[in-house]
């Protein structure tokens, strides 16, 4: 199955938050009780029950104020820091469409994925109303379940302005060509090669995105230490076996001490 991507054209976004609502509806996520503290952003942050969130960025430009609407959501990186950091096999997987998914049934709540994400996306919760367990990590799933049934993600399906679209990742060159014609820049995570691509009217930081996203150094260190730990463990096992074969088990002498002779 060909890999897919979500394309977000920020020039078409009106911040209607239809994508937020559709995400909650499809995933059966509860509403968040909030208070207004001077921002249109609601809910105030991602959580176990909020997988995508519209960002209202008010910027002073050309003598006035301009809105730049962004999205806080998982980018589904090809080089995913959360997957590299996770120590539990099967807790974070990637499907054939490119969706990076956390399996709460396997997740141990170590929070390594939280610290390994260059976009600060996974959220850790000790308990939740949806009954997905305590001490787990949560994030957008790119609606991998909908895709398995031949449907597109709920957010792209519901977008009324066409700001969100769903297409094959192989179509990225055509998307870049179209963006150049419209005077937009393409944000695809650089070396991380994300499956969520933004078309921006201004620099990434204006939309709450890192200008040059990169995996934390600790993520690279862990990706090296994990296989190294396995190698050292196996080396210890083989060394013990070799010692047993070459020398044999220790024998107890008449005085109760151990002896190898």
Image (cartoon, rainbow, N blue to C red):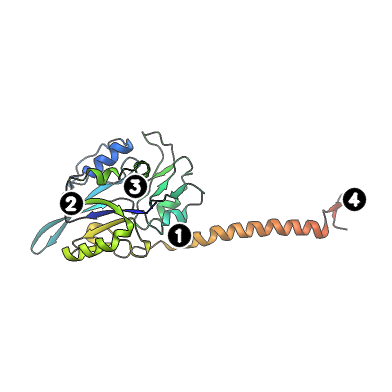
Q: Name the residue under label 3.
A: 142
The furthest residue to the right: 254
Q: Can residue 35 be seen in this view?
A: yes
Q: Is mark 1 on a helix, strand or loop?
A: helix
Query: Which labelled disc corresponds to residue 255?
Result: 4
Q: What element carries label 2?
A: loop
Marks 1 and 4: which is nearer the front?
A: 1
Does 144 sit left or right of 22 as displayed? right
Q: Is mark 4 on a helix, strand or loop?
A: loop
Q: Which of marks 2 and 1 is nearer the N terminus?
A: 2
Q: Position of residue 125 (x, y in %)?
A: 39, 42
Mark 2 to mark 1: distance in Å?
Answer: 34 Å
Q: Name the residue under label 1.
A: 219
Marks 1 and 3: which is nearer the front?
A: 3
Mark 4 to mark 2: distance in Å?
Answer: 85 Å
Q: Earlier in the sequence, mark 3 or mark 4?
A: 3
Mark 3 to mark 4: distance in Å?
Answer: 69 Å
Q: Where is residue 258 in the image (x, y as percent from the top left)?
A: 84, 53
Question: Is the C terminus in the top left, top right, bottom left or bottom right quadrant?
Answer: bottom right
Query: Which labelled disc corresponds to residue 259?
Result: none
């Amino acid at each position: 199955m060909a890999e897919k991507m979500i394309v977000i054209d920020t020039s078409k976004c009106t911040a209607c938050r239809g994508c937020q609502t559709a995400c909650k509806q499809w995933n059966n996520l509860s509403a968040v009780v909030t208070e207004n503290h001077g921002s249109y952003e609601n809910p105030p942050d991602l959580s176990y029950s909020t997988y995508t969130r519209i960002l209202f960025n008010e910027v002073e430009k050309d003598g006035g104020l301009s809105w730049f609407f962004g999205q806080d959501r998982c980018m589904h990186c090809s080089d995913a820091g959360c997957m590299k950091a996770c120590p539990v096999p099967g807790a974070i997987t990637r499907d054939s469409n490119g969706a990076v998914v956390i399996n709460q049934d396997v997740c141990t709540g170590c929070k390594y994925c939280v610290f390994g994400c260059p976009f600060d996306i996974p959220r850790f919760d000790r308990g939740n109303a949806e009954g997905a367990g305590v001490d787990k990590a949560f994030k957008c799933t790119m609606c991998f379940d909908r895709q398995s049934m031949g449907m597109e993600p709920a957010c792209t399906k519901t977008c009324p302005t066409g700001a969100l679209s769903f297409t094959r990742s192989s179509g990225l060159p055509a998307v870049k060509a179209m963006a150049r014609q419209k005077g937009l820049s393409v944000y695809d995570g650089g070396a991380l090669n994300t499956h969520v691509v933004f078309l921006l009217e201004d620099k990434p930081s204006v939309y709450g995105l890192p200008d040059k996203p990169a995996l934390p150094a600790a993520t690279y260190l862990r990706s090296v230490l994990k296989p190294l730990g396995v190698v050292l463990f196996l080396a210890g096992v083989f060394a013990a076996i070799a010692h047993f074969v070459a020398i044999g088990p220790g024998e107890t002498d008449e005085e109760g001490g151990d002896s190898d002779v």
